Amino acid sequence: MKKLILTGIFAVAGLTTTVNAQIQQGNWLVGSSLVSSNFGLNTGGGYNISVQPKGAYFIKDNVAVGGYVTLGFNKISNGSPTRFDYAVGGLGRYYLSPGEKGVDNLLNHGRWFLEGNVGIGGNTVEHGNSTTGLDFGAGPGYSYFITPNIGLEGLVKYNGVTGFGNEGLTSTITFNVGFSIYLPTSKAKQAIRDAK
């Protein structure tokens, strides 16, 4: 029984140490948001099915910068036609350290983060209005590490598109669920070599 308890304690301690190691300078993050719920600020709520692949490099501990692409369909609940969303741009993430500024992790094997993005994007409504221009967003998220290198993520985010077209500004608040793979630099280099 003592062996089982000690093994459990060392496993939890090792996982906590690994979580910190995954978000260190020089590592890579590759992932995607797969499902999102949309709470429209301009036109009412609805649902949004989108895919947002993203990749980032940790320029220093807890700070990652990279890029994203968004493709999605949005159906508004008030009977409006389907809307197609698209975007490409840069993103940044900042992971909060345990206990930083009074924010403690709910679970030992996860991390809170803040994500922001800026790019070019737009939306097109079938038989209707469209907007193309500056795509931007920001919000908090949580990454729960199911393995040392894979995190399930939840992200609440304000998203907006402003620019040219029939609508000046469209904005939504979304709840996104997805995953990220955290690759230490040596593993990332090996994965690139294996792909060639």
Image (spheres, grey):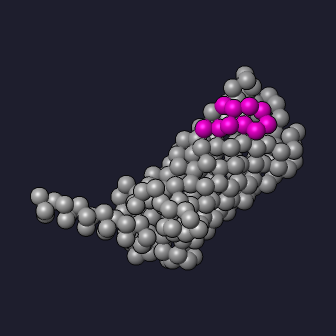
Magenta stretch, main secondary structure class: strand
Quarter of the image for residue 35 reads top right
Q: Is residue 30 left or right of residue 81?
A: left
How many numbered discs?
Answer: 0
Q: Position of residue 13 (x, y in %)?
A: 31, 67
Q: Residue farthest to the front?
A: 102
Q: Position of residue 16 (x, y in %)?
A: 37, 66
Q: Is residue 43 left or right of residue 102?
A: right
Q: Could one spot residue 192 in this view of the protein?
A: no
Seen from the viewer's position, the closer of residues 44 and 118 is: 44
The magenta segment = 37-46
Q: Position of residue 25 (x, y in %)?
A: 51, 77
- At x 40%, y 61%, the residue is 108
Quarter of the image for residue 185 reads bottom left
Quarter of the figure that contains the C terminus: bottom left
Residue 164 in the image: above or below residue 56: above
Q: Position of residue 90 (x, y in %)?
A: 67, 63
